[in-house]
Image: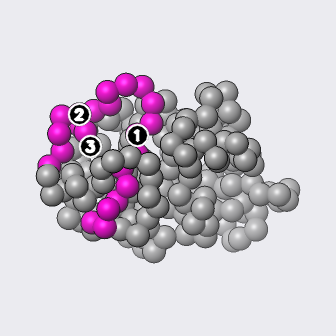
Amino acid sequence: MPVLSIWSPEDDVLGAVAPLALAAAAGTALVVDLDPNGPRYPGAGSLADLVIEGPRRDDLAPRRRGVAAIRNGGVDPETARDVLDALATGWPAVVFRLPRDTKGRSGAFPIVPLVPGGLLAGHPDSAVYQRAGWRLDPPGNGPVLPRPRRQTLGMLLTGKVPPPGDRWIRAWRDVWRHPWL
């Protein structure tokens, strides 16, 4: 059960769509938003609901292949610790979306910083660098993602998984294989 926490301190849009892409690259995965003010991912339930009602058996493991997302619903991640541990145990892969102000917090799962590649200073540890419209070398260690297609972003943001051959989704597989600290 690989689990990664993803954090995008510089770009809110990338920070909302990147966890979905990382999950899609895993094949079958769950995205859980740990930001009480995070995006409204498609779906009926929320992490807050799971904390109040307790997770059902269907919540704790995938029913079919693909990506599922749970929006936050206004709950503090520390309050949800037991639910998060249960989800991480039952799913083949889990992506936790961290709030923008996460810097400096440590957690039980590796934190993957996601930054626009080449424009800003490098991250002191490994990071994922997202290419933009210019060609600059990334300033640090870690996978470099190609620019995503507009259709790919649109699919992810409307609850659809892009085809497995999508170049941007394929590039996210390197993030799962990278040795995060």
Residue 68 tag number = 1
* Quadrant position of residue 1: top left
Question: At 67% across and 27% down in the image, what residue appears?
Answer: 165
Circle 3 residues within 10 Å: few <14, some 14–19, many ≥20: many
Q: CA distance from mark 3 to mark 2?
A: 10 Å
| Mark 1 residue type | Ala
Which of the two discs, 3 and 2, sits closer to the camera?
2
Q: Nearer the viewer, residue 169 or 72?
A: 72
* Vertical relation: 142 (above or below) 124: above
Residue 87 tag number = 3
* Quadrant position of residue 98: bottom left
Q: Nearer the viewer, residue 134 or 24?
A: 24
Residue position for label 2: 58
Sequence-first disc among 1 and 3: 1
User: Can you see residue 177?
Assistant: no
Secondary structure under the numbered disc 1 in the rendered image: strand
Sequence-first disc among 2 and 1: 2
